[in-house]
Amino acid sequence: MKNTKLIDRNELAVMLRTSPENISNQIYRGNQGINIPFSTKIGARRFWQLETVACWLKEQEDAQRELTKQLAEDKRQSSAANDLLYRPQNPRGIHLIKKKQ
């Protein structure tokens, strides 16, 4: 069996830049795997494998990167559609009509 380093709630909180209480709240609310990585309960204490935490952080980063790409693509597509619908007007939104002479 591979020797894996286990970290406790306080060390995880430092890694995620949050409080140990927030870690406990997320576990209580059932948000493991969503807002925090999955833990292992040993006796009355919870531990996280350092490798699991690193993989979870990488997955979060990849998901955020993919979401950012998708939002940028959607913005480009909507911008192109708006260019087709654009009709120039003066700043007050009133159509200017040329006077007949």
Image (spheres, grey):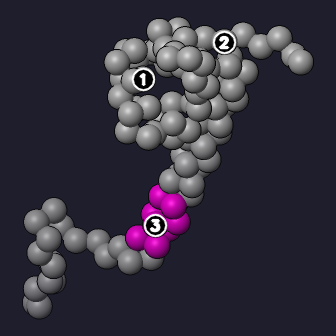
Q: Secondary structure at mark 1?
A: helix
Q: Secondary structure at mark 2?
A: strand
Q: Which residue is mark 3?
A: 78
Q: Amino acid at mark 3?
A: Ser
Residue located 15% across and 79% down the image: 95
Q: Nearer the viewer, residue 10 or 55?
A: 10
Q: Which mark is residue 6?
A: 2
Give x and y (percent) for residue 29.
37, 39
Q: Nearer the viewer, mark 3 or mark 2?
A: 2
Q: Magenta region, mostly helix, strand or loop? A: helix
**Above/below status of 41 relative to 93:** above
- On screen, residue 39 versus residue 18, left or right, reads right
Quarter where residue 19 is shown: top left
Residue located 42% across and 23% down the image: 23
Q: Nearer the viewer, residue 80 or 6?
A: 6
Q: Amino acid at mark 2?
A: Leu
Q: Is residue 22 magenta?
A: no
